[in-house]
Amino acid sequence: MINGAINDLAKARQELASAQSLEQLEQIRVSYLGRKGLLTEKLSSIKDLPPEDRRAAGQELNRIKRELEGLLESRQAELGKDAEEKDRQQKIDVTLPGFGTERGSRHPVSIILEEIVDIFEGMGFSVEEGPDAETDYYNFTALNFPKDHPARDMQATFYLESGLVLRTHTSPVQIRAMTKLKPPLRVICPGRVYRCDADVSHSPMFHQVEGFQVDRHINFAHLKGVLMQFLKEFFGGDIKIRFRPSFFPFTEPSAEVDIGCLLCGGKGCSACKQSGWMEILGSGMIHPNVLKNVGYDPEQWSGFAFGIGVDRLAMLRYKIDHIRLFYENDLRFLKQFY
Ligand code: PHE
């Protein structure tokens, strides 16, 4: 019986080596180890042997069985891998063209922001930055906002639980830069700002470039000269500009600048709220209280400051009639800029 089993094992080895599929492997397993398999039958006839031979025969047959099981398993792994590889080869058609790679494009607001910074750098301004989450002191108090000024109202300002505010303008960077540096200075501060506000030309998050110059004998003509030069470079010659008296706690006197709406040519449209003009910046002579707050003597130093609405400039440049388009991340829109 044992010899028979050893022969079975040798035969099974040959059959396993020439098996080409997992199905054939299963047939081989059944014919040796299945319920009526050759080896199974030999194992169950151990009981017919004389008692003294049973133990040795059982041990030997079990060894052969284990060996066969081991062989089956490793062949199964081999054939399984082959099948997977074949499958993969059938699925991949190497002659198909590739997907191609799409190029990203720069965000229109980033393009305009960089352009603005470039123009001012050309006029000798250097860049300073500050945090988006500001203290009340930098965003309001140091900028000469009285304690009960309406601009501190909850409606315009996002207050954070930490007690900080999301800066409502880039003007706090004026305070940070003036505290850090010594006059004379010429600085611009590009960045994100936040206000609880939304319509065609307002978004809760938008961009400003703050700019200011402090020196001896700086006056309103310097402010006007710098802004006119900037607008000429940015828009080319073909625009209408108007300075309009205004109020900011941190400048005196103050002016806002409007551009003749380029979307409708001044006729009136939804983007300019039918006025024919779009407000693009606030400006003025830095208030003596602000200079005092940063330790500059207003008798010796004077300065101007301005804050430009970057998104508005981008709307005018690209003739976009709703600020929301900049923040919806619609690729069909964003792909048109580079
Ligand atoms: N901070 C003002 C605003 O956001 C703009 C401004 C900046 C006005 C500097 C005057 C001087 O509306």
Image: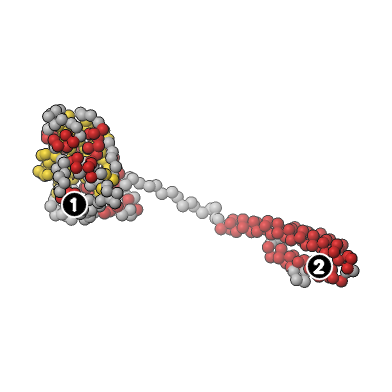
**Residue density around tag 1, few if under 14, some if 14–19, many if 20 or more, within 10 Å:** few
Can the viewer see residue 292 in this picture? yes
Name the side, left or right, on which 121 lies relative to 298.
right
Give SS at disc 2: helix
Marks 2 and 1, how far apart at CA: 92 Å
Q: Is residue 215 above or below residue 189?
A: above
Task: Say if residue 207 shows up in the picture.
Answer: no
Query: Would residue 332 appear left or right of 141 to someone viewing this image?
Result: right
Residue 237, position in %: x, y? 17, 39
Q: Is residue 104 left or right of residue 292?
A: right
Q: Disc 2, ligand 1: is the CB inside 8 Å?
A: no
Question: Residue 315: x percent and y percent?
Answer: 23, 49
Which quadrant is the N terminus positioned in?
bottom right
Q: Nearer the viewer, mark 2 or mark 1?
A: 1
Answer above or below: position of 313 versus 50: above
- Vertical order, 65 against 133 (above or below): below
Question: Dot 2, crowdedness within 10 Å: few (<14), some or many (≥20)?
Answer: some
Per the image, the residue denoted by label 1 is: 153
- Amino acid carrying mark 1 in the image: Asp
Q: Are marks 2 and 1 in contact (CB under 8 Å)?
A: no
Nearer the observer, 155 or 135: 135
Q: Which residue is mark 2?
A: 43
Q: Depth check: give the residue in front, 82 or 251.
A: 251
Circle nearer the N terminus (2, 1): 2
The residue under the point 17% across, 49% down is 151
Q: Which residue is pictured at 26% across the width and 33% down the height?
A: 180
- The three-letter amino acid code for the residue at tag 2 is Leu
Residue positioned 32% across, 50% down in the render = 334
Q: How is the image coloured?
A: secondary structure
| Residue at point 26%, 54% (across, down) | 324
Q: Quadrant of residue 120?
A: top left
